[in-house]
Amino acid sequence: MILYINSCVRSDSRTDRLARAVLSKMGEYTELYLPDEGLVPLTEEALIKRTKLLSENDTSDEMFRYAKQFASADKIVISAPFWDGSFPSLLKVYIENIYAVGIVSRYDEKGIPVGMCRADELVYVTTAGGKYIPDFSYGYIKALAESCFGIKNTRLVMAEMLDIVGMDAEKILKEAIENI
């Protein structure tokens, strides 16, 4: 199963457009449109519940639905526009909700995360109005994928400079799509 994690909130999102071009080359997919999911940051109460359930190896609760879906995907595509030096906060809330030890990762005897995800590839798709700086967006996702989730193959697909006066945003986006 290809899992498409869509964190684009605009109906005319250029990032989503680029991501769908990527997906068109990959095959059928399941879309998780984060703005419709009602995700919220974990509270103390939710953390206590999650810790208790995981310590009992009980992952049947609904709170683990996203983690199980993520861990069982064969390929993952994440669309996230470049906002304020990173990605939409909703994507971080999603990551917070899926990072369940025993589902997406475990710890070895030295306390180092060992990935438990099945995916062999994660594609991160983004667009930026100016120059794209991947450190706090793709760099973060890549580090999590490789170091914690066990997804060794990550790839960045992006289009940048889309809002700079004198640049042809449509042309830039079309070239990015052609280069997929």
Image (cartoon, helix red, strand yellow):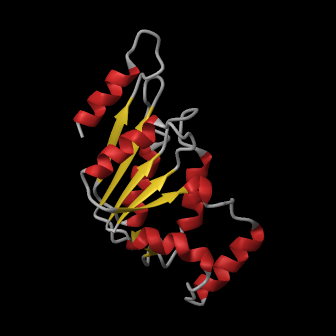
Mark yes or no: residue 100 visible: no
In this picture, residue 126 sits left or right of residue 42: left
Q: Quadrant of residue 37?
A: bottom right
Image quarter of the N terminus: bottom left
Say above or below: 115 vs 152.
below
Q: Identify the residue at image location x=36%, y=36%.
A: 158
Percent across and percent down for residue 124 are 38, 47
Q: Quadrant of residue 29?
A: bottom left
Percent across and percent down for residue 34 are 56, 55
Say above or below: 158 vs 23.
above
Q: Residue furthest right?
A: 45
In the foreground, 158 or 8? 8
In this picture, residue 133 sits left or right of residue 172: right
Q: Quadrant of residue 95?
A: bottom right
Say above or below: 61 vs 71.
below
Percent across and percent down for residue 142 are 39, 51
Say above or below: 119 vs 11.
below
Q: Residue furthest front?
A: 11
